[in-house]
Image: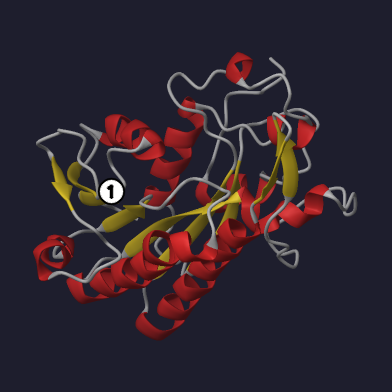
């Protein structure tokens, strides 16, 4: 698909900032975030509340990269309803109204988190039944990502409805683990087990993947892809991602 104007939501966040810097010079950009963090190029917008002041910015956009969300995987339902659920509905409706051709949605590995406790099948493909959320321990704190993973899964399903009913092209990327900053494999905390380590997604591979999703064939109506680096020994299947959008990851958590 040929794109000229790309709108990024969550453009001032960790993932959004990295994708923005990569896409600058490749496309014309419109940038939205609930907290602009002092950046004059980012338009402040609370996407959980419909407002014509930001809705009109979707007019004439070719592709939307929807990264805006609360990224904390242990939030409760009440904390996620606005930023991670209502915002998805609003963005998709604004995209359809604005004539947007494609939306790339930041889903999450947590949509399949239940497979952490189930060792079969050997490969986690995007056509397996979803098992949102997982329980894990960080520094003796028990965490539960079930609400977060479920909200991301709901976003995928809402995208499917819009794709089928409105003709929007929708690609959901189940993003692995993107740490802040340089996001090197060596930055992964030593107390995290292989489930977490092997879903690492480097900055370079993240940005390449998002660009490939923007440029992927215009015939794609609805798709879900896994978004991890080429990590040796991981269960996550990225062959489908390679074939569908031309993803060519360069990094491996073990190298």
- Say above or below: 32 vs 233: below
Q: Could you say where residue 195 lies in the image, as x and y percent from the top left?
A: 76, 37
Closest to the observer: 184 or 44? 44
* Residue 94 falls in image quadrant: bottom left
Residue 34 pos. (x, y %): 25, 50
Q: What colour scheme was applied to this rendering of the protein?
A: secondary structure
Q: Nearer the viewer, residue 26 or 106?
A: 106
Above or below, comparing residue 104 to residue 15 in the picture:
below
**Residue located at (9% from left, 64% from top):** 53
For residue 11, which quarter of the picture? top left
Instruction: Locate residue 54, reporting x and y percent.
Output: 15, 61
Most foreground residue, 198 or 231: 198
Q: Which residue is mark 1?
A: 8
Q: Residues within 10 Å of mark 1 (few under 14, many from 20)?
A: many
Residue at 70% x, 65% y is 130
* Location of the C terminus (image quadrant): top right
Instruction: Please provide percent x and percent y for residue 142.
Output: 72, 43
């Amino acid at each position: 698909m040929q794109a000229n104007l790309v709108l990024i939501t969550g453009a001032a966040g960790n993932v959004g900032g990295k994708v923005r810097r990569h896409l600058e010079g490749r496309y014309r950009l419109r940038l939205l975030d609930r907290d602009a963090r002092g950046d004059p190029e980012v338009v402040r917008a609370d996407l959980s509340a419909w407002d014509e002041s930001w809705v009109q910015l979707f007019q004439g956009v070719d592709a939307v990269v929807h990264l805006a969300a609360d990224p904390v995987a242990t939030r409760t339902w009440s904390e996620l309803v606005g930023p991670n659920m209502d915002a998805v509905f609003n963005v998709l409706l604004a995209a359809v109204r604005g004539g947007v051709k494609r939306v790339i949605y930041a889903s999450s590995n947590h949509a399949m988190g239940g497979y952490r406790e189930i060792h079969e099948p050997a490969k986690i493909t995007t056509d397996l039944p979803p098992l949102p959320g997982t329980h894990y321990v960080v520094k003796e704190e028990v965490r539960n990502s079930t609400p977060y993973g479920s909200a991301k899964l709901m976003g995928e399903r809402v995208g499917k409805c819009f794709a089928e009913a409105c003709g929007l092209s929708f690609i959901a990327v189940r993003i692995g683990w993107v740490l802040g900053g340089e996001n090197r494999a060596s930055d992964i905390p030593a107390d995290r087990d292989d489930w977490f380590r092997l879903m690492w997604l480097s900055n370079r591979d993240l940005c390449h993947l998002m660009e490939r999703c923007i440029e992927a064939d215009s015939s794609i109506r609805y798709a879900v892809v896994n978004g991890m680096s080429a990590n040796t020994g991981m269960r996550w299947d990225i062959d489908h991602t390679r074939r569908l959008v031309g993803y060519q990851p360069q990094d491996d958590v073990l190298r």
